[in-house]
Image (cartoon, rainbow, N blue to C red):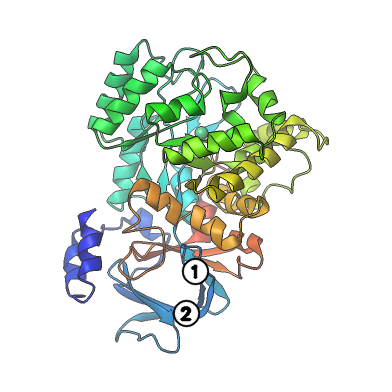
């Protein structure tokens, strides 16, 4: 990431910026241009409320100046100079946030059977961008070549979508029974897999529920040899063991930690339900969880919140965002509604208990100094639809007890920090990429306003959120 450092260091030398950026600015295809509403070199967003992504209090009546893909100035509307010739967008009543950096955003979707997951390569990139996500990590791939090709197409402007940190295929032992997943045979196999996909463009990796400690150690060492990070949705290996082996990130939080299962056998995922019932029985504020948190934080293990997918298993929740339901194919809609109808009404059900325990855990993790990240994980039984899911995740972080500005920071700057890109993305500041989410209303006082996305800027190009959402109507589950 030398480029943004150069720009930050040479903030005086604005003349540098267009020259450096010219090579980056993609040529937008006719397909991509259908969704673009602002594509001028210099654009000014004026009279907006700014939530800058750092956790700072919102600032009213601000101006943001964007030039050649970068934010070049922000400040009070009354005093911030507007460059001559700029396109001026007066946007009173709108709030501008950094483009979201969301770290558990698969490109696949469950379509009924549990054994094959359907790639959403057409609709998902549009949906993520529509919901404000300008950078995503896929956190496990079913079709890594598709994801890599999509990333390249987005980067060249051929199709609209967020920047993608492509995670390689799941690194998983035998036991998952997914047709698309390669079952590891040995630690050497894990090393080979990581090496192959790192050499073919994957920029992160994810361990899964049935790996052994030896395979995990091998995969971590190989990922780190390539200077890449590796996360895990674990079961066979405990959080504490994974942290000792050097894992960078854990997905989903405490609800999947097998650390508290009595008689846990090494390298074996406990039988169905054992992890969940162990977590349901534990006191999140108690000594054993606090000690685990301290251990993970001391080893700089980041934690990814995916409250949206757990919400689909809990009782007495608000109805799904209407647009998300409309985005599904009729078959996917039936699948989701049937699944939802089986959840029942019991607020003491396991799904409900786990959602609340997880919320409490995430607050404790952040309070202990842990890096909490945000993601949506469009899995479960299909109730998590990209884009809408990113908005919902932020609402759920607020329900968990974070302020709106904290929830937005977790979903922007924290993700950028984890990716090592905080010098270029993740907050609204001069010198950073002009990745901006513009919503009507004020999410700092009414979090559901986060659903009113109007425009999303990526590298200074403004996309019409509604047009992108509309393009994916009725196709989630198909392509
Ligand atoms: Zn996932």
As drawn, is 246 to the left or to the right of 96?
left
Say which quarter of the image contains residue 57: bottom right
Q: Position of residue 105 (x, y in %)?
A: 47, 41
Give the quarter of the image for residue 398: bottom right
Q: Which residue is mark 2?
A: 62
Count of numbered labels shown in the rendering? 2
Who's the residue at 66% across and 65% down the image?
446
Q: Give how far across and how far down residue 234 sits, in percent.
A: 50, 26
Residue at the extreme right of the image, as rendered? 345
In this rendering, the answer to whether 22 lies above or below 340 is below
Seen in the image, is 66 located left or right of residue 95?
A: left
Identified at 26% across, 37% down, the residue is: 227
Pointer 1 residue: 96
Instruction: Tell me whether circle 2 and circle 1 mark residues in contact (CB < 8 Å).
Output: yes
Q: Residue at x 42, y 41 (%)?
A: 300
Residue 313 appears at what percent x and percent y?
Answer: 69, 35
Q: Which mark is residue 472?
A: none
Residue 200 drawn above or below residue 236: below
Residue 208 can be seen in this image: yes
Residue occupying the point 29% across, 14% down = 188
From the viewer's perspective, tell me whether residue 392 is left or right of residue 50.
right
**SS label for mark 1:** strand
């Amino acid at each position: 990431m030398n480029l943004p450092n150069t720009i930050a260091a040479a903030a005086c030398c604005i003349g540098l910026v267009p020259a450096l950026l010219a090579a980056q600015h993609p040529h937008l295809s006719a397909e991509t241009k259908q969704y673009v509403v602002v594509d001028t070199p210099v654009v000014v967003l004026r009279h907006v409320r700014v939530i800058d992504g750092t956790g700072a209090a919102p600032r009213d009546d601000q101006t943001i100046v964007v030039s050649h893909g970068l934010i070049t100035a922000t400040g009070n509307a009354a005093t911030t100079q507007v460059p001559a010739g700029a396109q001026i967008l007066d946007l009173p009543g709108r709030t501008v946030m950094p483009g979201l950096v969301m770290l558990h955003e698969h490109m696949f979707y469950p379509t009924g059977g549990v054994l094959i997951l359907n790639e959403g390569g057409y609709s998902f990139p549009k949906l993520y961008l529509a919901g404000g996500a300008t950078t995503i990590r896929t956190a496990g791939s079913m079709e890594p070549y598709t994801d890599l090709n999509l990333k390249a197409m987005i980067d060249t402007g051929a199709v609209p979508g967020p920047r993608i940190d492509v995670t390689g295929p799941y690194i998983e032992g035998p036991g998952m029974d997914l047709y698309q997943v390669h079952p590891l045979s040995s630690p050497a196999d894990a090393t080979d897999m990581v090496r192959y996909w790192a050499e073919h463009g994957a920029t992160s990796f994810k361990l899964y529920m049935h790996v052994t400690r030896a395979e995990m150690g091998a995969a971590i060492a190989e990922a780190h040899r390539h200077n890449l990070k590796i996360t895990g949705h674990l079961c066979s290996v405990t959080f504490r063991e994974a942290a000792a082996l050097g894992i960078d990130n854990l997905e989903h939080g405490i609800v999947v930690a097998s650390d508290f299962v009595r008689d846990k056998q090494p390298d074996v995922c406990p039988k169905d339900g054992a992890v969940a019932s162990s977590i349901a029985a534990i006191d999140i504020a108690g000594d054993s969880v606090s000690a685990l948190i301290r251990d993970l934080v001391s080893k700089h293990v980041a934690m990814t919140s995916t409250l949206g997918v757990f919400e689909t298993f809990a009782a007495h929740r608000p109805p799904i965002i209407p647009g998300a339901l409309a985005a599904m194919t009729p078959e996917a809609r039936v699948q989701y509604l049937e699944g939802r109808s089986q959840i029942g009404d019991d607020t003491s059900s396991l799904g409900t208990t786990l959602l609340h325990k997880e919320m409490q855990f995430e607050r404790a993790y952040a309070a202990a100094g842990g890096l909490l990240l945000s993601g949506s994980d469009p899995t479960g039984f299909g109730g998590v639809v990209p884009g809408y899911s990113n908005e919902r995740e932020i609402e759920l972080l607020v329900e968990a007890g974070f302020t709106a500005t904290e929830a937005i920071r977790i979903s922007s700057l924290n993700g950028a920090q984890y990716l090592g890109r905080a010098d270029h993305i993740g907050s609204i500041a001069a010198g950073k990429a002009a990745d901006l989410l513009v919503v009507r209303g004020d999410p700092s006082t009414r979090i559901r306003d986060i659903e009113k996305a109007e425009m999303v800027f990526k590298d200074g190009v403004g996309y019409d959120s509604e047009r992108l959402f509309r393009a994916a109507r009725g196709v989630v589950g198909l392509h």
